[in-house]
Amino acid sequence: MKQLTFIFSLIFISHNLLAQTKPWQGKFEPIDHMISAPNVYRSASGAPGPEYWQQRANYDIKASIDENTNVLSGEETITYFNNSPDTLDYLWVQLDQNVNKEGNEDFGSIGNSMQDGITTRKMEFLTRPIKFPAGYTIKSVTDSNGNPIRTLVNNTMMKLNLDDPLKPGASIQFQLAWSYPVTDRGLFRLSREGYEYYPEDDNKEFLMGHWYPRMAVYNDTEGWQNQQFQRLGEFALEFGDFDVAITVPADYLVAATGKLMNPNEVLTKTQRERYAKAESSFDKPVMIVTKEEAIENEKTKSTKQKTWKFSAKNVRDFAFACSRKFLWDAQAVKLPTNKVMAMSFYPKEGLPVWSEESTKAITQALEVYSEATFDYPYPVAISVNTSNVGIEYPMISFNGGRPDKNGFMSDRAKRGMISTIIHEVGHIWFPMIVSSDERKWMWMDEGLNTFLHQRTLAERYPEFPHTTPKSIVPFMSGDTNIMRPIMVTSDNELFNQFGNNFYQKPTVGLQMLRNSIIGKELFDEAFRTYANRWKYKHPNPADLFRTLEDASATDLDWFFRGWFFSTDHVDMELSNVKWFKVYEDDKNIEDQNKASKTKIEAEGNAADSQAKDFSNGPEIVTMVDSPDSDYGQFLSRIDSKEMRKAVSGKNIYELTIKNVGGLVMPVTIQWIYTDGTSEIERLPAEIWRRNEYEVKHTFMKDKEVQEVNLDPNFEFADTDMSNNSFPKEEKPSEFDSFKNKQD
């Protein structure tokens, strides 16, 4: 018992020597209490549980556009399947177009205020003096027998009260008739859909997103997701099959989610022949509608109509764009398990860059994202040119970026256009297939998508600038009093911060996991596992966190806690470096005297001080044989002679590293030697477990060190690199800086 007590005492003393003296913050504690608990629906591994369920909604829609009044009218039949274990007394339907009504948040005051010289457009954003109609007119909601269903509208949500509750495993079919005036996208900020008017040729381009009443999500974590649409947080939607008929002027082209079902009725013979040629063109796009044909088409202003019919299977949404101005090109993309038609629709105002770059960018995204997750499963991927927006839907996206009237586009603007196309096409994976809740967790689709978007740029457009850990430093160095963590819900982020917090910061976090913490091979496998586990399903943040750990055998709670749940930042300080050598009795007399002198000087003057460089030489320490008491009950002994041989002539360095920013990370150390060579050494994040504020680590080197640097390749978004090196750089005092300015 006495011996056991003695051993515990030794352990207690040694741990206290290493323990932190500041408050413990639990940076390595599990995050289980911060995320939803696993259950039969969502397993502790991050996979869907054995009783996972989700609802389904099929749509049959007939819609028409009156280009003279800009009114879109529709009739739809929704078949809703209750796969939940709950009986539903009512349903919620989303009426997203109501967000355009006056009085809703329109972000008009962002970066805008009353001032002398205010522009007319900014005045419109700010006060909306030019009134325009907006929002749905719901003409009828009836059951399958034609009987009216009692409804109640709350802004962007409509409640359907059921006479007969919908039981588990049952389905219901109901019909809606509605219309709304399509809004001019130029009249308000953050306009993802609407029409764009071209005064030069008196034509319009309609971008129809979130245009039809659609089912809200009902799920296992919160019941009905009936949070109001406020523009910033986008959509949560159920998967289903769509059959959609769109009636437009006869000279319009329509690009839409899904497969065109009646090409013989809406395309000319020449267009069908060109499309057939494009289906076997894997190296370049084929023009289906040329510039000359589009210009001629602009003049026709047909009073006749055509109905385009599309079918889309297992998608969560449906969007379309239409205009008589469109050029159209297409190219086939061969993936391991699917052939996809990459297509672009654009007005002549997009030339020449859109014909040169848009479909090419689609193919790059299709290939990189498919390799990183799963093969793109749909028949088409479409990019439509518009102004001032990038927005995604299943199989189709609306993307800004145009040259000036002379066809010129700067390299920077062209890069932005290509980047936008890749980003929006990438969204077809996240969240259109891996269907997270955008309205609640914007970062789950924007962050994961931007991660692969930036990887696509790095691999396929290496000359383009792309996000790296250094990119997020200005944001991470900002005012933490107003900063929100990534894990803030979508609509509660500041407008001027959501780009950094929901796009860039998650991207950098995933880059660090891939490149510096987990490793590329393991991370890629884990990320692919997440994507395949949750395709066509509704993952939550906990499912992502758990899967990345489960599929990589890496404890990442410390990382998720710091990077996603806090506003801490990385700032490691190399606060001290001590250089030691072991005193050797058998050295020649001259070296021994020199060593003794160095040792005495160190003990007398600088043993506890912080050196600024290595100019004073090493501190000489003695090494004595270990007493028997050091070994406890072990009978074997270290060979002291061999130990002295092993350390003879070696350079021993003790590094003191402080965690100034609060965010724990692995430590990457660069050693630069006096002979000009260098090496990189890595310490895991776990070195901060016993002391979250400061760690010491000792290294033995054959060579003498000239310089030591932390994070030399900028892997961890360190916000202050000036304190990462030894010898330390002398900084001029404020007085000296002021004096130098005066001189």
Image (cartoon, rainbow, N blue to C red):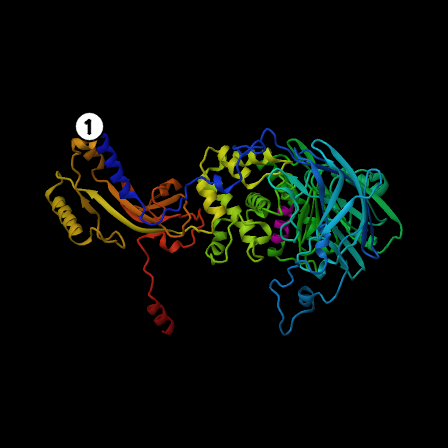
User: Range of the magenta residues?
Assistant: 415-424
> Which quarter of the image is occupied by the N terminus?
top left
Q: Position of residue 470 (x, y in %)?
A: 47, 51
Q: Nearer the viewer, residue 157 or 30?
A: 157
Q: What is the residue that sits farthest to the right in this orientation?
A: 304
Residue 558 is drawn in which quadrant?
Answer: top left
Q: Can residue 292 be seen here?
A: no
Q: Is residue 149 above or below residue 129?
A: above
Q: Quadrant of residue 582?
A: top left
Could you tell me residue 607's position as x and y percent? 20, 50
Q: Using residue 559 as the reference point, say whether residue 456 is left or right of it.
A: right
- Locate residue 85, reporting x and y percent: 65, 33
Identify which residue is drawn at 22% across, 26% down: 634
Residue labelled with disc 1? 637
Labels in figure, total: 1
Q: Secondary structure at mark 1?
A: loop
> In the picture shown, does residue 685 fall above or below 22?
above
158 displayed left or right of 420: right
Q: Determine whether, in the image, residue 602 is placed left or right of residue 329.
A: left
At label 1, the amino acid type is Arg
Q: Which quadrant of the rendered structure holds the C terminus? A: bottom left
Residue at the limit of the structure toward the front, as seen here: 163
Q: Is residue 417 magenta?
A: yes
Of residue 466 and residue 101, the one placed in the foreground of this image is 101
Percent coordinates x, y for residue 643 in the rendering: 20, 33
Q: Nearer the viewer, residue 355 or 650?
A: 650
Residue lying farthest left? 589
Q: Dot 1, how many residues are within 10 Å of its Cα: few (below 14), some (14-19), or many (20+)?
A: few
Question: Does the rendering let one see residue 506?
Answer: yes
Residue 689 among magenta residues: no
